[in-house]
């Protein structure tokens, strides 16, 4: 039950993130809904395809579809109350990657995969929806910029497996690992921490 709540919260966060980008691009109602949908289930769909889940999870559980539609309507109706688009986008996107990282890791564990593969699945689940969102909105995906994005997911995944050696409460591990992802991402942006570039200035 707790795991399902985490999954739904991640879906809501990413749906709102997608809506904010779509509104910023001045898309129509259909475009807004499509971007919200792709952002929410893109990573999970790729994850399910990779581990052989057929059909993918959101196709067998209409709760996800209803949650995405409701979240999109909520974000559109209350877009002024949500606040500044870019700041709100960053917040919901960060919450989304934190929650979806642990969701992806859990899916890998259920499939009986190695911890390293589970962390990779968590990162894919967290990041790929945002990649699809940015591509469809004609933006360079955040994960391919200097900004820290996938790294917090990996560190959150490592924390998850480290805690499993000392903590028996799985729900507690979910929460801590998700918070690690969110906190690292927030601190990285706040402190302007980025990965080193592979090119020199004169190559620009």
Image (cartoon, rainbow, N blue to C red):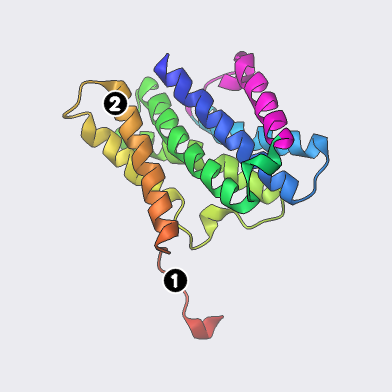
Q: Say the numbered circle drawn on residue 172.
A: 2
Q: Secondary structure at mark 1?
A: loop
Q: Is most of the magenta stretch helix, strand or loop?
A: helix
User: Which one is earlier in the sequence, the residue at label 1 or at label 2?
Assistant: 2
Which of the image's four quarters has the N terminus? top left
Tell which residue pokes out farthest to the front in this image: 81
Residue 189 visible in the current orientation: yes
Q: Does the stretch in magenta take in 62? A: yes
Figure check: 61 above or below 146: above
Image quadrant assignment for residue 169 = top left
**Residue 154: image x %, image y %?**
36, 45
**Discs 1, 2 touching: Cβ within 8 Å:** no
Magenta residues, as a range? 51-77
**Residue drawn at (61%, 14%), measured in percent from left and top?**
60
Tell which residue pokes out farthest to the right in this image: 28
**Residue drawn at (69%, 36%), measured in percent from left and top?**
78
Nearest the viewer among 50 and 157 is: 157
Nearest the viewer among 101 and 48 is: 101
The residue beneath circle 1 is 198
**Residue 76: image x %, image y %?**
73, 36
């Amino acid at each position: 039950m707790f795991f399902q709540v985490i999954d739904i919260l991640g879906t809501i966060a990413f749906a709102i993130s997608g809506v904010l980008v779509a509104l910023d691009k001045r898309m129509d109602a259909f475009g807004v809904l499509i971007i919200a949908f792709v952002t929410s289930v893109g990573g999970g769909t790729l994850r399910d395809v990779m581990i052989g889940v057929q059909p993918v999870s959101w196709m067998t559980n209409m709760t996800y579809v209803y949650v995405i539609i409701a979240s999109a309507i909520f974000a559109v109706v209350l877009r002024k109350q949500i606040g500044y688009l870019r700041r709100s986008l960053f917040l919901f996107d960060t919450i989304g990657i934190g929650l979806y990282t642990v969701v992806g890791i859990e899916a890998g564990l259920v499939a009986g995969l190695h911890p390293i593969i589970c962390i990779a699945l968590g990162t894919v689940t967290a990041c790929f929806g945002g990649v699809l969102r940015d591509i469809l909105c004609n933006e360079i995906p955040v994960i391919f910029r200097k900004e820290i994005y996938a790294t917090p997911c990996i560190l959150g995944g490592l924390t998850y497996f480290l805690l499993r050696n000392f903590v028996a409460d799985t729900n507690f591990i979910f929460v801590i690992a998700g918070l690690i992802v969110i906190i690292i991402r927030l601190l990285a942006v706040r402190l302007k921490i980025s990965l080193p570039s592979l090119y020199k200035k004169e190559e620009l």
